[in-house]
Image: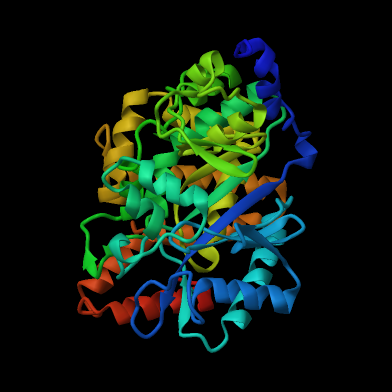
Amino acid sequence: MLKLESDVLDRSAILNLYTKGYTRPYDYKVGMEFERLPVNTETYSAVDYWGCEGVCSLLSKFAGKNHWDYIVDEKNIIGLANEHDTITLEPGAQVEISTKPENTIFKLKEKIDNINSKLESAIGEKDFCLLSYGVSPITTNKNIRIIPKRRYKIMASYLWGILSDVMMRETAGIQCCIDFKSEEDAMRKYKLANKLSPFMTAMFANSPIRGGVDTGYKSFRALAWINTDNDRCGFAGKISEEFSFEDYIDCVLKTPMIFIQREGQPVEINGNITFEEFLKEGYHGLCPSLEDYELQANLCFPEVRLRNFIEIRNHDCVGGCLKYAIPAIYKGILYDNNAMSECEDLFKHLQYKDFSELRYNVPKNGLQAELKHSKILDYAKEIVQIAEKSLKEAQTGEELFLQELKSMLNKGISPADIIINKWNGSWHKNPSKMIHYLIDVEKNNYY
């Protein structure tokens, strides 16, 4: 007879996954995950996992030169690890750097720049680069193979949105991780991060050219996420004033399950039940465990995800020093009570439906999207001003990382706007010029 829910998985154990993240404010750190696209510098096509010129070969060479450990799935190399730092592969062989969180963005930058330098050395004479851009510029998903990781193959078969294959195989983004000191603090930051989400998407939009054409969108990456799986993407909950850890857990429980792991092997569920139903009834004689819940939570992809920290996920990959403006904004606002209050005041006249509608408007219109007869650009400037003031008051010098973004906002543009103008102007729709421009941005640290 199947065990009762209370005997199988104690809800307090699930809650502890979140409460164990409580951090004292003077120990707050900022984390960052940085994904890039492997692109051939001669053909401008996507570089896949296989072959002597493939991404797996790059990982092997990097590990040999720098003594990192392999991360494997059925003997296939899917990433590298060095203590708390990792280099992992997304489904279409996008390369992600994830480092141990640091208390300053200067330290975060030093670590990421160091890993990047070693990656460049490992690439050596290979005819490809890691492109800081939000979507595959030339090769579309039908010609990008999923890497040999079992989880990704199951996800590719299950995710039902019309652009889910684009999301998995073509896109690259930047994520930021933020600490909290209590449930009340976590919920305040969680709700504010969700409200900031569409404005941040607009500021860092960087994926207008896809498949060698101007898509008409400032962030095609953001469009792909909207059309991936409504059950597990978007806003988790209504970001209401009463939201709690328990409410977030309920969102995870009510989401259809994709698979679980047993003895190292995936057991496919393919949306047949929710985790809530799994808790009550089991599945084909299997009982739920805490590890099953953790996997379920990681297979939910809201724009802001709760863990034992807050993971903010909704930014196109951008190059140069501009990428460090992302953690700078969140650190400036979410680690300062006055800055949070100023942002809350900025948004106090807006309803949930306004943020939800904006999420659909921003991918196409970026900073030119409108909200209650105001441009998103005007909100963006105020958001950056609030973050800058906070960072200056902290006297860490980290306001430096906002300077390029401020310059762009003063011109009313995002990275996508620069690319669109050049694409339809001096580049004459030539992909080669765009690729080399993006490479130069990364080298010169400036758009």
Specify the color scheme. rainbow
| Residue found 27% across the figure and 41% down from its top | 361
**206 left or right of 386 in image:** left
**Quadrant assignment, res 432:** bottom left
* Residue 145 position within the rendered picture, expressed as x and y whole percent measured from the top left: 39, 63
Q: Residue furthest bottom?
A: 125
Between 242 and 49, the one nearer to me in the picture? 49
Q: In this view, does 275 lie to the left or right of 357?
A: right
Residue 322 position (above or below residue 392): below
Asked if one can make out residue 344 in the rendered structure from this viewpoint, the answer is yes
Asked where in the image residue 352 lies, by quadrant, the reply is top left
**Total tally of numbered discs in the picture:** 0
Quarter of the figure that contains the C terminus: bottom left
The x and y percentages for residue 283 are 51, 23
Quarter of the rendering containing residue 59:
bottom right
Please state the horizontal and vertical placement of residue 36, each as a whole percent of the image: 48, 64
Q: Residue at x 71, y 53 (%)?
A: 100
Question: Which residue is the extreme one toward the front?
Answer: 1
**Is any part of residue 208 visible from this angle?**
no
Q: Is residue 420 above or below residue 382?
A: below
Quadrant of image for the N terminus: top right
Give me the residue at 52% from left, 20% from top. Answer: 278
Report the side of 339 relative to 133 (left or right).
right
